[in-house]
Image (spheres, rainbow, N blue to C red):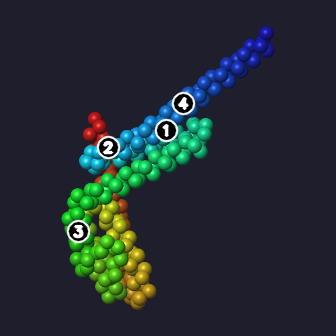
Amino acid sequence: MKRFNLILGAASVAVALTSCKNENETKAEKTVDTYVVYVDSIGGLAAADAQANWAAIEADYQQRTMEAEAALADMKDKEAAQKRLDDSKAKYEELKSKVQSQAAASNPDRKTEIRTSLFPAGTIGDDMSFAWVNKDNILKVYNDFYNAFDKNQESYSREDLDEIKLLYEALDNRKNTVEKEGLSGPDNRKIAELKVKFAPKFKWERITTKGEENKEAKQAAE
């Protein structure tokens, strides 16, 4: 009788564990399903609505992505679930790119304003090749860039900072070429000093701007 009770007790524990596992799997599946549906619903928004509410959408998306990725641990078929997440992420990035392009198109003067401010010595083409930058003027170009950013850093939006990042990386690519064309050691060291000063300032602006967007999104959701 005692042996039967032990067996019965073990069976009860096994059932409880199985039930718990099934419950966790069900919850995880629901989280992933909700995530996929959410991304699809964003894609169905009117372009103007998506653009006007993008800060809130971005904050909500990041939170849901974290939850969906955490849910993978409880999924039975992790590979299939991961593929669904990856497909939805790709959809979101495509939509994000579209919204950003529409925002830039609706305010083309802002893009020109930023480029003129950061690079008063030359015109930036669409290819951002910086072909006019050479060993004789590159230090001044970096210096103008840094001074303009330092002066206006608190006025930049998230989109502005994205544009600045692209421009900065393109300038750095041009610097790699200029170094091979006879960039002097003293000028190179001064540029390195400017880059060291710029990096933390830019990083701080990215962090604080994102924090402000998340705060606005939270307030809008309340």
Which of the two labelled residues, at mark 1 and mark 4, occupies the earlier sequence position? 4
**In which quadrant of the rendered image does the N terminus lie?**
top right
**Residue at image point 71% right, 21% down:** 10
Instruction: Check disc 1 and give the amino acid type.
Output: Val
Q: Nearer the viewer, mark 1 or mark 2?
A: 2
**Mark 1 to mark 2: distance in Å?**
21 Å
Residue marked by disc 3: 112
Q: How many marks on residues?
A: 4
Give SS at disc 4.
helix
Residue marked by disc 4: 26
Which of the two labelled residues, at mark 4 and mark 3, occupies the earlier sequence position? 4
Q: Are marks 1 and 2 in contact (CB under 8 Å)?
A: no
**Mark 3 to mark 1: distance in Å?**
42 Å
The image quadrant that residue 41 belongs to is top left
Give SS at disc 3.
helix
- Give the image location of residue 91, x and y in percent: 43, 49
Q: Residues within 10 Å of mark 1 (few under 14, many from 20)?
A: many
**Mark 4 to mark 3: distance in Å?**
51 Å
Please indicate whether residue 29 sits to the left or right of residue 176 in the image: right
- Observer-nearest residue: 79 or 155? 79
Residue marked by disc 2: 45
Give SS at disc 1.
helix
Q: Residue 32: which numbered mark, if any? A: 1
Q: Residues within 10 Å of mark 2 (few under 14, many from 20)?
A: few
**Residue at image point 59% right, 45% down:** 79
Instruction: Check disc 3 and give the amino acid type.
Output: Thr
**Residue at image point 34% right, 55% down:** 98
Instruction: Check disc 2 and give the amino acid type.
Output: Leu
